[in-house]
Image (spheres, grey):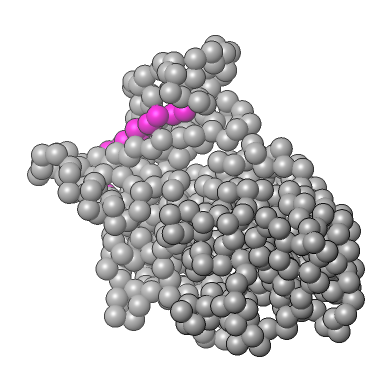
Amino acid sequence: MIGKVNDDFFRQAILPHTGAGAPEVVVGPRMGVDAAVLKIGEEYLAVAEDPIFPGPTMSPDDFGWITVHIGASDVAVMGIKPQFMTYSLLLPPGTPESYIADLVRSISNYAGELGITIVGGHTGFYGAVNVPTIGGITVWGLGREVVTPAGARVGDAVIITKGAAIEAAALLACELEEKLLAAGIEPGLVERAKKRLREMSVVAEAGIAMEVGGVHAMHDATEGGLARGLWEVAEASAVGLRIERSRVPVPEDVRAVCAHFDLNPYEIISEGTLVLACAPEKAGALLAALQAAGLEAAVIGRVVPLAEGRLWVEDGGREEKLLPPPVDRFWDVFFNALALKDDTRTAAEAALCRELGQAVRELQEANIVALIPEIGANLAYCLPEARELKDVAAIPGRLLRFKGRVAALGEPEMGCSTHMGGAILTVREFFPAARCVINLRHNPRIRQACTGLGFKIASMPVPDGYRQADAEFYRDLRQTLAGCRELPDVIEIPDRINLERLILVLGKSPAEIVAKVKALAAKVEELG
């Protein structure tokens, strides 16, 4: 798991352990609240802490900007102006002094622009650190009025700024620009997404909201994106929500980046998207003030009683539960950014591997261990126009039986399985619609199960002397297919000396293969 710990672990293992109590604490650690609030005399003190990680190719200037603004945003959403900060800069040994000087200067400049004074911190080199990292930035400020994510009231208008997935789109476009362009995404859209890096702040809009007034709750949609940000406000405030998905802005550039990486824009990190609950009579004035400052914003729904639930309302009135995503999938993509940059696959090949990987996970979850041969199974899936082995994706290390479960050795790659790749390419000579194959073990009970399911079965001839070289295998496979009027579901591979008995299960897609194999496994178990 990458990112924040899950909610249950936070509640059970972290939340109960907060040291000594103190009467000054107005808002302490809780789900969905990114800053603490203390009552100091007649004023409220809001204080927030965050680690900040740079992208693999992020400049010191951009790193400095997001360091300051991400830290300051957590205080600003409490309705208090950020005033002071400290930070710890952790560096890998050998980091050039010029890089450190540029980063420190950048942090100072952007803190100064926001009126924040840096009052301390720490800087040092550590062998356990792989990239320059802000181990923690602490920002705080004092004010006479405080707003928390727990203040949303029934009847409030729900407003968001900028749109969904701002941070995710910005970081992916900055780190993986070449991949996006190679996939055919319009250069102007990629450039627009890159520029959103400097939109990863809610300091300006939070300040405007406090000036307009009527704001009851504010929250920055960080990990888990808009869906989690909305849910956290509702959870903290013990209210329900009705959010009209069609009214949520998803800018064209953001949508394009998310689609390429198969990411749901509503459920991935969106630092820079401010979620507000405000009195409905103030919504118009707030939207106008934000627009005048050049900040896009939209009313996307309203706060309702808790008993009415938390719902996405789709076009046509269909309702769907609004739940926090169990994991923010952005992190998997982001932390693999450098590997992805070295990935020479086309967009179609990457999509093929993703689809195949999902099928492998479904077969593992179904635990088809009784069907896995001693030599292991492999699942191969080819491009629609496949002609060569390089056009076929498979598992480089096969699916194996391990301690009563199915283990997958490796993620799908192009051109890595000679036998299953060769088999599907041969099948396609006769049935071009075929794109997927898996080899499984064979015995009388599996044969009975195939028959019971009504599978179309073809049988390869027994080779002379029960010996068969690779060239002879493909010759016999072609002979078998030539006698088939339609694509068989199963091809039986005959007895051969010192070789395990196998079957090939064929299909037009991984989903079809998964359905056939799961049905076969269930039937085998039923037969005992």
Q: Position of residue 473 (x, y in %)?
A: 82, 61
| Residue 487: quadrant of the picture | bottom right
When the figure is inspected, residue 109 is found, relative to residue 284, above or below; the finding is: above
> Which of these two is toward me, 310 or 457?
457
Q: Please name the residue shown 24% across and 46% down the image.
A: 14
State the predominant SS element of the stretch in magenta.
strand
Asked whether 61 falls inside the magenta stretch, the response is: no
Q: Position of residue 246 (x, y in %)?
A: 58, 73
Q: Is residue 111 visible?
A: no
Q: Which residues are magenta?
A: 133-145
Q: Is residue 494 visible?
A: yes
Q: Please name the residue shown 57% across and 86% down the image.
A: 316
Total marks shown come to: 0
Q: Please name the residue shown 49% across and 34% down the image.
A: 53
Asked whether 136 falls inside the magenta stretch, the response is: yes
When the figure is inspected, residue 78 is found, relative to residue 426, above or below; the finding is: above
| Residue 74: quadrant of the picture | top left
| In-image side of 347 versus 4 (left or right) | right
| In-image side of 502 versus 322 (left or right) | right
